[in-house]
Image (cartoon, rainbow, N blue to C red):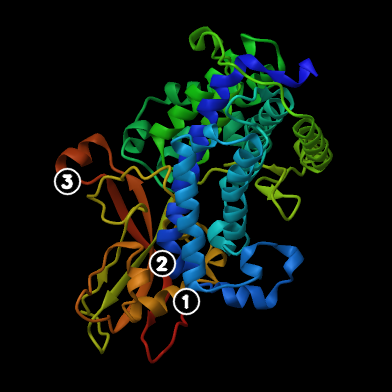
Amino acid sequence: MEWFTAEGYWLSRLIFQRALAVLYLVAFLAAALQFRALIGERGMLPVPALLRRTPWRAAPGLFRLHYSDRFFALVAWTGCAVALALVVGVDAHLPLWAAMLLWALPWVLYLSIVQVGQVWYGFGWESLLLETGFLAIFLGSGDTAAPVLVLWLLRWLLFRVEFGAGLIKVRGDSCWRRLTCLEFHHETQPMPGPLSWFFHHLPRPVHRVEVAANHVTQLLVPFLLFTPQPVASAAAVLMIVTQLWLVLSGNFAWLNWLTITLALSAVDWSFVAGAPPAQSAPPLWYEVVVIAVTALILALSYRPARNLISRNQVMNRSFDPLHLVNTYGAFGSISRVRLEVVVEGTAERVIHEGTRWQEYGFHGKPGDPSRLPRQFAPYHLRLDWMMWFAALSPAYARSWFGPFTERLLENDRDTLGLLRHNPFPDSPPAHVRARVYRYRFTSWRELRETGCWWHRDYVREFMRPVSPAGGPGGRH
């Protein structure tokens, strides 16, 4: 079937596959380095407890067969090794069936991790990585031309990512319709980057242009992905430029980079790629598999597509237990005020008015007002992100904040490994407390006078002081 392949997209596929492999590597590395404190056997939300209270069919994966911290580490580091092999192009030297199995392995491994990740893995880019990774299995490699159907499915995924994000904005917060959201967003986003302070201080007309350009890119340009070349390539390039702007302005784990990766698959690189290498006709079994997978994805797309046109649109929702087809979106509402939970401890056994409290430092979330935010994306700091949600509403922290403070009171090595600074390196604190502060970016004048990027004011108590004898209680 001549229509089945697109020989001119061999370089598009190659760039897409290598970029996706890099993101797989980042995701597995983050899992390997953070899991013990978050979901390990002694973690804040232990996987064994989750497995005991949930049925297999709700979240199938390898850990339904066996769980131990050692086995999880094996899964995560194996994922790193396979991703690294894909980065260097091992799949290109394998038979088609073997290359597909190699691409299937990180998908199975990461799906198993997400299924037991609980709130720590409740982000839309987890499903996006899984959905993209599943399609990559059937993209072929080596001397087999890229299948047209899978290339179209990748564009359908990119369309849902961008169009869903655009719709949730205009349906949600009125500031998107008034073009004023970016007067707040750079300051109140979950994890600002080193340039966020400067983006925040751009003139208001520039912020309005930013929002208007975002609406065009997310609500109009996605439809051009389904037009002939070179229009489809131009649409993809516009999306890439927009995503790079977001990369510069904040930290959103691998969301922006994965969106860029999807857009790269839609670009026709034939004008720089030259003649394609010798490519053999795809075997019949491969054509049958790709057609069957395409039919499956289209059938599963019904509910996400219906969600797109629904007035009650939801974002970042999986409609099947394997995360094969999902709905996406971000920032349907924008916070006008930045609240931060500041965690402190003291070595004093008896608390009094003059008690000296020392602050724990986080890698990504704002703390010390004089510290310029750092760049971490595409790496994902899961605890830092959840601390942002906790400041929005204590309900987001109800399941894990108590165990978190317990482990601080024990100087738990794995938990402290998630932090930048532990003020009690020699012995655990006697008490730990948490307070809510309002943060705002300083002005140019304040920065010159104080050297601080942030100004903060105390708002309220988040958790009263707790001690080892008192347990992890406390009122949020």
State whether residue 289 appears in this view. Answer: yes
In this view, 295 is above or below 115? above
Q: Nearer the viewer, residue 417 or 32?
A: 32
Q: Nearer the viewer, residue 249 or 150?
A: 150
Q: Quadrant of the N terminus?
A: top right
Q: Are marks 1 and 3 in contact (CB under 8 Å)?
A: no
Type of residue at label 2?
A: Arg
State whether residue 172 appears in this view. Answer: no
Closer to the eye: label 1 or 3: 1
What residue appears at the point 44 percent right and 44 percent down from the top-left corner? Answer: 84
- Disc 3 is placed on an element classified as helix
- The residue pinned by badge 3 equals 450
- The residue pinned by badge 1 equals 402
- The residue pinned by badge 2 equals 460
Pointer 3: residues within 10 angstroms few (<14), some, or many (20+)?
A: few
In this view, 281 is above or below 339? above
Q: Quadrant of residue 11?
A: top right
